[in-house]
Amino acid sequence: MPIETSAVVGDPGDAELLAVPFTSDLSPSVELHLPVSELLAHYEAKGEAGEIVEVPVPRGDGVGRVLLYGVGDGSPRALRKAGAALTRRVKGRQALTIVPPDGDVSAFAESALLAAYTFKIGSAGTKPVRELRFAGADEGQVRRAEIVAQAVALARDLANTPASVKNPAWLAERAAEQGLPVQIWDEERLQSDGFGGILAVGRGSVSPPRLIQLSYTPAEPTDRHVVLVGKGITFDSGGLSLKPTDNMKTQKTDMAGGAVVIAVLGALAKLGAPVRVTGLVAAAENMPSGTAQRPSDVIKHYGGTTVEVLNTDAEGRLVLADALAYADAELDPDAVVDIATLTGAISVALGRNVGAVYASDDALAKELIDAGQESDDRLWRMPLIEDYAPALESPIADLSNIEAGSTYGAGSITAALFLREFAGRRPWAHLDIAGVGRSTVDEGALTKGATGFGVRVLLEWLTKS
Ligand code: BES
Ligand code: MN
Ligand code: ZN
């Protein structure tokens, strides 16, 4: 379900429910016929982002309300916090008219919309506010916020959908709905084209794997071509290297990277992105069964590289390897970015708020980190430590999919080194979003469950560069 709250440009007029910004000098930005400074002082408001002081005011024959909202230092970060707090406060209401803070309103509006996101099967709970009216705001900025927020919501929806509904074929159908040219490899075509990694991971499941390709071409012709690759494991049980229940129960979101790729591709045309983009989603369900791959099997990836599978739970890198090798061999991109809930180890390193970026190219890393800062999908660069490459040596194949012993550790780094083997010599970046792909709290623009992390940074990068 998309975000049910709409964002429009309005005028403050005699709004039932009006939000007005204030800063640390406790003066609101518009004339309200209220002793505002005294009220704020009375409630000990400090002007911090996220603070809201609600004041009843006479309106016609009844009572209206003004929400005085703090904007902190007025930075995009503070404004995002302020916007989300407002939406959460007016849950269940018809409309909120907002006198926006100074400057570009898109980050503020985007965050306000994202805080209204819910995923429910059934009709429990209070509905989000129906309409947010941004008084006197720039139409284009509000529209951009809405497109980006709806793309994040789509990524969240896809990832929050239970795996009993969401198998690889289902994910391919959702991709095909994005209004773009699409190509789908079913199991037979995967076989004949040599996608041995995707097939090996998918073979334990009754729902066969798919490789999904979406293509966006801008209206203005351009030479620049970016390939996005998403991990699309619709459920990761671990396979025969089975996960314990507690670790398994979050793994319907193991296609979060693939969901981001689908949502980003779907939004590019609406935002008029000036670059050609191909999206690849390597989709499979990782299940244990009599047909599943075994620890110790050797598989052959697209392009011929052989891999000894020592742990079937290190499956994300196996499906990504095929897609990366295919992109390098067939699509001639100027840059490749993959996005994946790849390793538990990255949430030990960076926690739940900051995603990891690995890159073979400093300029690409910087562009992504800057876009992350701007869009609030924050990224931190992690190193591809050359000394750890021997961790992936195999006595019988070109590579093993995990370290056999425990000499090197660094689970997220060794996973990235594995992927690098398949990306070719092109500028390549890998986003490990295992830590940030899910949220345990409703806070700011985040809602419990899938976060859609990656949509905002990639859209920022692809539309502003
Ligand atoms: N999908 C998991 C990674 C994951 C863990 C994502 C927790 C989100 C939350 C991935 O396929 C996996 O199982 N990785 C293993 C790799 C190990 C077997 C080398 C891990 O991180 O434990
Ligand atoms: Mn796994
Ligand atoms: Zn996984």
Image (cartoon, rainbow, N blue to C red):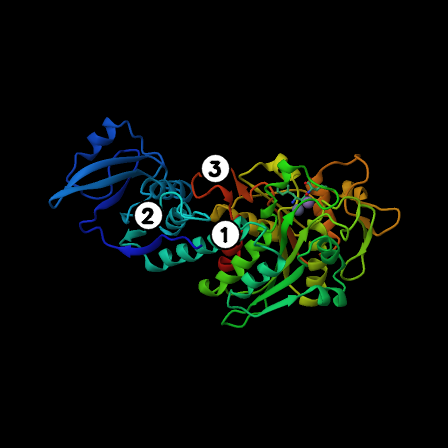
Q: Amino acid at mark 1?
A: Asp
Identify the residue position indicated by label 1 in the image.
Answer: 157
> Which mark sits nearer the N-terminus, 1 or 2?
2
**Ligand 1 picture quarter:** top right
Q: Is residue 54 left or right of residue 234?
A: left
Q: Give the residue pinned by disc 3.
A: 441
For the question of whether residue 277 can be seen, the reply is yes
Residue at the disc numbered 2: 129
Q: CA distance from mark 1 to mark 2?
A: 19 Å
Task: Determine the image quadrant of residue 284.
Answer: bottom right
CA gap between label 1 and label 3 equals 17 Å
Residue 152: % across, % down: 48, 52
Q: Residue at 67% x, 37% y: name it.
A: 244
Sequence-wise first label, 2 or 3? 2
The amino acid type of the residue labelled 2 equals Val
Q: Secondary structure at mark 3?
A: loop
